Image (cartoon, rainbow, N blue to C red):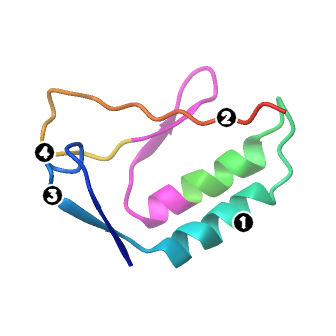
Amino acid sequence: MIVVEHKYFGGGKKMKVNMEYAIEKLEHLLNIPSPSGNTHKAMDFIEKEFKALGIPTYRTNKGALVGKIEGVNTEKEVTLSGMWIH
C-alpha cells in the first residue's frame, strides 16, 4: 500500500493507494481495443469501475465521461484529462 500526501486530497491529508489494484485495472484498460473515435468499450469499463467505487458519473453531450469526487475544499476544482496519441 502506498500513501500519497497532497494538498488536493483534503488539505494535505494522506490517501492510501493500493498499487496492485491500480496496476491490475490499468492493465485491463490498456488491453481494451480503443482506436480513435471508437473508445466506447474503454469508457464503459472506466464508468463501471467508477460506479463500483461509489464515484458518480455522467456523459457530456460530446461523449466525454465525467466522474466527480467531492473534496474538502469545494471552492476549487481539479480536472484530470487523459488521452493517448500515437
Magenta residue span? 49-67
Q: Residues within 10 Å of mark 1 (few under 14, many from 20)?
A: few
Depth check, front residue: 71 or 8: 8
Relative image position of residue 56 (x, y in whole percent): 39, 49
Identified at 63% across, 72% down, the residue is 24
CA separation in Å, label 4 and label 1? 31 Å
Q: Specify whether 5 is left or right of 20.
A: left
Magenta stretch: includes residue 36: no
Sequence order check, earlier mark of 4 and 2: 4
Badge 4 amino acid: Val
Q: Which residue is mark 1?
A: 28
Callout in the foreground (3, 1) = 3
Residue drawn 57% across and 59% down? 48
Give amino acid for label 3. Lys
Decide: is 61 above or below 6. Answer: above
State the image coordinates of residue 62 (x, y, percent, origin top left).
Answer: 62, 20
Q: Earlier in the sequence, mark 4 or mark 3?
A: 3
Say if 62 sits above or below 58 in the image: above
* 3 sits left or right of 62 in the view: left
Compared across the picture, whether 50 is left or right of 46 comes to left
In the depicted structure, whether residue 27 falls above or below residue 70: below
Residue to which mark 4 is pinned: 72
**First in residue order: circle 4 vs circle 1:** 1
The numbered disc on residue 83 is 2
Q: Is residue 18 left or right of residue 30?
A: left
- Total marks placed: 4
Q: Nearer the viewer, mark 4 or mark 3?
A: 3
Residue tagged 3: 13
At a point 67% along the width and 34% down the height, the residue shown is 83
- Mark closest to the chain's N terminus, 3 or 1: 3
Label 4 close to label 3 by CB (< 8 Å)? yes
